[in-house]
Amino acid sequence: MNKIIIAILLVVFSLKVFASGLSVEQARESLGTIKELTPWPWEEPVTPILDEYLSADFDQYQGWAKSMYMVDELKMHKWGQSITEFIVLAELLYTFQPEDYQVENKHAFEAAITQLDLFRLELNDFLYPYVPGYNLKQHNLVRHFDGEGIVIAVFDLFDPARLEEQRAQHANIEAEVQFGDPITFLHGNTVIDIILDLAPKATIVPVSTESKTYNEAMAYIRNRDDISVINMSRAFHITSDQLDPEFAEHLSHILQSKIFTKSIGNTGTDLDGENSDVRKRLGLPPLGSFFTYDLALIKAFLAQNQSVPGSQNLMFAINLQPFSDQVSLTATVPGYNELAIKRSFAISGDAVFSASSHNFESGSSFAAPQLAAISALLLNAADYYGYSEAEAVPIVVQSLQKTARHSHLGSNNTGLGFVDAHKALINLKRLSDGPIKAH
């Protein structure tokens, strides 16, 4: 009797398919093949995803409630990334097998990988309509401005093959400017995706560098007068366990005439390394991170440059959860550093779709380019309203700071609050008619 019930359940489950016809059971078969051929040595994250999908009742909710169920409760935006990480590691483990074994099983292994990856793509396509979009109050701004004429440098790491695909799709992406021998990493491609989602006609300058050539990259950006905005979703440069002085000098000079947006980090702490409020409330221990050193570098730069002209043009992005009701569990927050508070904005970066990875990406790395794009659109507006180049950068930064929406989470968690692009645009337009203008 039990065998009959199990058989019936398997038939029912196998009918639960996505639009392409790829079923969960096909994904499970592919997973089994991959684990057998690797052989997989640990617990893997994909089986719980398949089980949770099968047990979910998506039809019990509609509209916003369905979004909350899929994203907030099931956390489906993290599933695609988990599958990708499994595939990458499985492919690596397969290369450890004897060469004749790899040749013999090549077709079966590649077919299983392809099928599992197709499941991931379908999963994300299924989820996409239910994930909250950008929460920047940007709708009026993007309706009137597109970033044309504004040049944004993306200081990051890139996958060159994917970058060429992006360049084929967008004529406004320049060729990669490379210093040293940086690693291949899809991270910067996703940053470009996000910027062009919001500011589709901005000119993008991809700047990649390894750690020892950071200062060459900064000098390049410093000397390009046409660059108005720089996004850095990487750590500041460290030398002998402290902020590199040459890097700091380049950044100080850049800030005199350009906007610099930076991810504040993903350590689950404040800038002093104290556990964040949300982690304390949930009883979670501090989150270890390789990039905790960046906290000290940020604090050092802010302290050294607090009275330097243009220092306010450095803006940080704090990562919020998808519905913007709480900072991310991994987010770095300003804490009680006043210099960081008045330069930081809380932006949802915990479920941002990337056309490059076809996953929902998470982290302050993907909150910062949203701030960069909004800055570019506001610079576009400033030009339209007659501001000179010298006036535009400070007035855009002031407008963003002045109009940030208050957060009930407190400035120690969310800095100035949430970006309000609409009010920033209104403030910029109002000031263009006021006494500060001299035309």
Image (tube, rainbow, N blue to C red):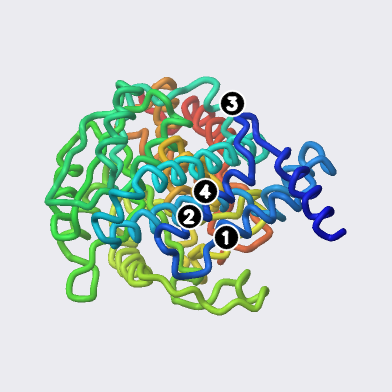
Task: Find the distance from the CA under tag 4 to the CA under tag 2.
Answer: 30 Å
Instruction: Give residue 76's position: percent from left, percent from top.
Output: 63, 50
> Mark 4 or mark 1: which comes first in sequence?
4
Tag nearer the camera, 3 or 4: 4
Task: Write down the residue under mark 2.
Answer: 363
Tag nearer the camera, 4 or 1: 4
Viewer-side residue, 406 vs 291: 291
Task: Find the distance from the CA under tag 3 to the CA under tag 2.
Answer: 26 Å
- SS type, badge 1: loop
Task: Write down the residue under mark 3.
Answer: 140
Q: Residues within 10 Å of mark 1 (few under 14, many from 20)?
A: many
> Mark 1 or mark 3: which comes first in sequence?
3
Three-letter amino acid code of the residue under disc 4: Ser
Which quadrant of the figure contains the N terminus? bottom right
> Mark 1 or mark 2: which comes first in sequence?
1
Task: Write down the residue under mark 1.
Answer: 328
